[in-house]
Image (spheres, grey):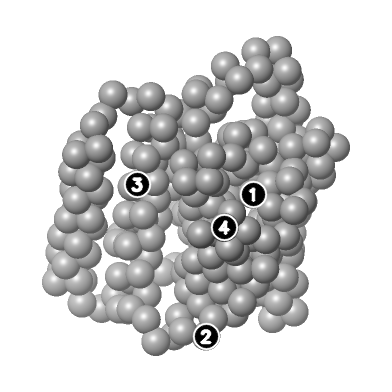
């Protein structure tokens, strides 16, 4: 299989997942580029951020037209997330310039940890959703928004992961947004954040535009197809499966970073993650039959 075709298929697969679940793009694409395609981590992160910025802009514009975006909260989050993401991008490039390829291994470890946290957050949010409450802004919302945005922005600028699942959890638990506004606000803010991080990476030369173009060729139809078929798929099971994929990807990155785990051990890890997700899904479905499938 040619390199170009493989990149298009990567984009198609990730686009299908994003279209069907709304999350998971950056968390899955970076491991694919690093582990499978052998792209250097810094270039993989920069290219992934640019690719994700284009796709999130389309989604954010759609949600804005549907009035499912809390614009004030999105801008408050961006006050913290944009400078934090830019700071992380320049910090990453500075460290690469000082220590060269020696940064690859610790960077892969950081990405693996961030992706594992995303997987756990997604699994928790899906299986144990907080009770629905009337939408109510917390006291001193702008402080909480800036701090939350800075945390998410720094992690995203450093690893290209974490803007979706983690922020969605914060929007529900901390800011108590109505469910129909969580996704819209998350995607709209992600578009602002991703463009800021992308511009930083473009200035520093960390974006492979040819590679990003190939990914977009596959992802655009993938997102459209995934959006259409999402209403026919068991959403709860699909999101649980995606969380499992993230945890499995974190294990693959750990091995790529030098974790002394033989191939059989990696297979066992994949099996444990899959079995754990299935058992948790079944238990929650039995104990909370009111949850939508």
Residue identified by numbered label 1: 48
Q: Name the residue under label 2.
A: 228
Helix, strand or loop at mark 4: loop
Residue 139, x across and y down, in percent? 60, 48
Secondary structure beneath disc 1? helix
Q: In which quarter of the image is the C terminus?
A: bottom left
Between disc 2 and disc 3, whose residue precedes?
2
Q: Nearer the viewer, mark 4 or mark 1?
A: 4
Residue at the farthest front position: 1
Cα distance between the residues tagged 4 and 1? 20 Å
Q: Where is residue 4 in the image (x, y as percent from the top left)?
A: 62, 58
How far apart marks 2 and 3 lie (CA) works out to 26 Å
Mark 3 / mark 1, whichever is N-terminal: 1
Q: Distance between the residues labelled 2 and 1?
A: 24 Å
Q: Where is mark 4, residue-wise?
A: 2
Q: CA gap, disc 4 to disc 2?
A: 29 Å
Q: Nearer the viewer, residue 280 or 67?
A: 280
- For label 2, the SS is helix
In the rendering, at what x and y percent does residue 26 appear?
56, 52
Quadrant of the image occupied by residue 257: top left
């Amino acid at each position: 299989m040619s390199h170009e075709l493989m990149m298009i298929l990567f984009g198609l697969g990730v686009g299908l997942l994003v279209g069907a679940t709304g999350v998971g793009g950056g968390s899955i694409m970076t491991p694919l580029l690093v582990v499978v395609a052998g792209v250097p981590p810094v270039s993989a992160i920069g290219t992934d951020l640019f690719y994700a910025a284009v796709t999130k802009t389309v989604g954010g514009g759609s949600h804005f037209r549907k009035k499912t975006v809390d614009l004030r909260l999105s801008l408050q989050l961006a006050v913290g997330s944009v400078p934090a993401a830019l700071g992380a991008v320049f910090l990453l490039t500075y460290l690469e310039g000082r220590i060269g390829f020696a940064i690859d291994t610790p960077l892969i470890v950081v990405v693996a940890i961030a992706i594992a946290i995303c997987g756990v957050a997604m699994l928790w949010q899906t299986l144990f959703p907080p009770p629905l409450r009337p939408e109510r802004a917390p006291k001193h919302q702008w402080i909480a928004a800036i701090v939350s945005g800075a945390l998410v922005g720094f992690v995203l600028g450093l690893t290209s992961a974490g803007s979706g699942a983690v922020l969605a959890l914060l929007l529900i638990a901390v800011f108590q947004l109505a469910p129909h506004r969580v996704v819209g606000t998350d995607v709209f803010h992600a578009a602002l954040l991703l463009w800021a991080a992308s511009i930083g990476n473009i200035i520093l030369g960390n974006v492979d535009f040819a590679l990003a173009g190939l990914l977009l060729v596959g992802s655009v139809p993938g997102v459209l197809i995934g959006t259409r078929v999402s209403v026919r798929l068991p959403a709860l099971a699909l999101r649980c499966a995606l969380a499992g994929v993230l945890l499995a990807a974190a294990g693959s990155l750990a091995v790529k970073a030098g974790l002394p785990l033989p191939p059989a051990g990696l297979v066992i890890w994949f099996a444990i993650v899959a079995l754990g997700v299935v058992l948790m899904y079944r238990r929650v479905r039995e104990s909370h039959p009111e949850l939508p499938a």
